[in-house]
Image (cartoon, helix red, strand yellow):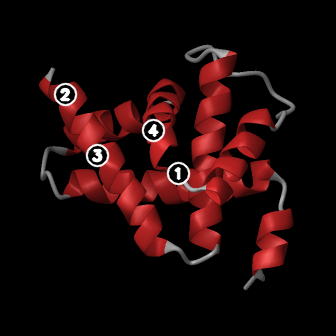
Amino acid sequence: MLSEQEILSLHPLHLAFVGDSVYTMLVRVHHIERQGKLKQLHQWTTSMVCAASQARYLQRLLPDLSDDELEIVRRGRNAHARHTAPKSASTQEYAGSTALEALFGFLYLLGRNSRMEELFHLITAMDGEENDA
């Protein structure tokens, strides 16, 4: 396992690489609990893992983040990937989604599972509000 110092020194795209998987897994488990048909589970999941949604969730999470979490978000947002943003997202949305993924990767690698679950709960509450609107 990596030390805290090693985790802090990782490139934000490495954190996002891990965080993408962690976040997607959390979303999938959350939707399995809703017990829809597989096609519906896939649609629910893709709606939460797209760059636009992730960027929107991040903006709403910002007031709840600690200083060290905000620093990871800043680093993730400013990381420059070699590839451009996908056609389905703006450059700003792609940067926001990378920042959210970096945050989840950071929390996962540090073993801050309760904090990760707390933030994910806030996201699912936002998702419920948006679906109710």
Q: Residues within 10 Å of mark 3 (few under 14, many from 20)?
A: some
For residue 82, side relative to residue 84 (left or right): right
Counting residues from the N terminus, which is met first, the one under dot 1 or under dot 4?
4
N-term mark: 3 or 1: 1
Q: Earlier in the sequence, mark 3 or mark 4?
A: 4
Asked if residue 17 is positioned above or below residue 129 in the image, the reply reads below
Q: Nearer the viewer, residue 55 or 81?
A: 55
Which is nearer the N-term, disc 3 or disc 2?
A: 3
Label 3, label 1: how far apart the Cα atoms are = 16 Å
Residue 124's disc is 3
User: Could you tell me which secondary element the residue under label 1 belongs to?
Assistant: loop
Q: Nearer the viewer, mark 1 or mark 4?
A: 1
Q: Secondary structure at mark 2?
A: helix
In this rendering, position of residue 117 left or right of residue 34 = right
What percent of the width, then of the height, locates residue 97?
58, 35
Assess disc 4: are there few (<14), some (14-19) or many (≥20) residues with their C-alpha within 10 Å of its C-alpha: some
Give the Cα separation between the discs numbered 2 and 4.
15 Å
User: In the rendering, which numbered label is found on residue 65?
Assistant: 1
- Residue type at mark 3: give it: Thr
Image quarter (top left, top right, bottom left or bottom right) of the N terminus = bottom right
Q: Residue at x 65, y 41 (%)?
A: 99
Mark 1 burial class by Cα count in 10 Å: few <14, some 14-19, many 20+ = some
Q: Which residue is mark 4?
A: 49
Q: Nearer the viewer, residue 70 or 43?
A: 70
Tell me which residue sits at (75%, 78%) in the image: 4
